[in-house]
């Protein structure tokens, strides 16, 4: 079963994504900020994709990306950024950091699933 790590601080969105991914047959691992996301990566070696919010407490998405993309064991895990930040500069920054997909909030179930299937 394909494991997807979702790093998102808004509990309603986190639960919605989990429901969507569960319905599609993915195994979902949840983290409420970047620090929990790093711990989840340390505890799970077979994560196939990360869905990442940018604005979060403790460790934001940019800090999380910097850590994983500089790590030999995590740098090849594809990342989809799911955020309310929709400025061109944010999208360009994400792409320059190695992000494979960028989805603006609010998002549709179809858009999320299509992007996931395009990547994995």
Image (cartoon, rainbow, N blue to C red):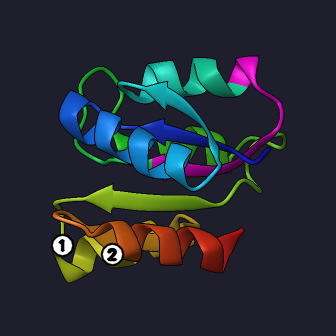
- The answer to if 43 sits in the magenta stretch is yes
Give how far across and how far down residue 6 sits, in percent.
47, 40
Residue for point 53% across, 66% down: 99
Left or right of residue 36: residue 100? right
Foreground residue among 97 and 45: 45
Q: Nearer the viewer, residue 86 or 27?
A: 27
Q: Are marks 1 and 2 in contact (CB under 8 Å)?
A: yes
Instruction: Mark 1: give few (<14), some (14-19) or many (20+) Cα within 10 Å.
Output: few
Residue 105 in picture, x, y percent from top left: 19, 63
Nearer-N-terminus badge (1/2): 1
Say if the magenta span includes residue 60.
no
Magenta stretch? Answer: 42-51
Q: Which residue is mark 1?
A: 86
Other residues around mark 2 within 10 Å, as few (<14) / some (14–19) / many (≥20): some
Image quadrant where one finds the N terminus = top right
Label 1 to label 2, Cα distance in Å?
7 Å
Identify the residue under disc 2.
Answer: 91
- Relative vertical location of residue 107 with respect to residue 59 in this rendering, above or below: below
Q: Residue furthest front?
A: 23
Place residue 111 in its image quadrant: bottom left
In the rendered image, which quarter is residue 18 located in? top left
Mark on residue 23?
A: none
Does residue 53 appear in the picture of this structure? yes
The residue lying at 36 percent from left, 27 percent from top is: 59
* Residue 61 position (above or below residue 30): below
Q: Residue 15, percent across and down?
A: 32, 34
Q: Quadrant of the C terminus?
A: bottom right
User: Residue, x 30% and y 43% (percent of image)?
Assistant: 16
């Amino acid at each position: 079963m394909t494991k997807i790590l979702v790093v998102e601080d808004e509990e309603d969105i986190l639960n919605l994504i989990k429901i969507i991914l569960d319905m599609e047959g993915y195994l979902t691992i949840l983290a409420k900020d970047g620090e929990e996301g790093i711990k989840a990566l340390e505890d799970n070696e077979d994560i196939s994709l990360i869905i990442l919010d940018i604005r979060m407490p403790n460790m934001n998405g940019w800090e999380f990306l910097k850590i994983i993309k500089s790590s030999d064991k995590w740098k090849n895990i594809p990342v989809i950024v799911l955020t309310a930040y929709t400025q061109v500069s944010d999208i360009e920054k994400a792409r320059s950091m190695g992000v494979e997909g960028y989805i603006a909030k609010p998002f549709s179930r179809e858009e999320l699933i299509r992007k996931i299937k395009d990547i994995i």
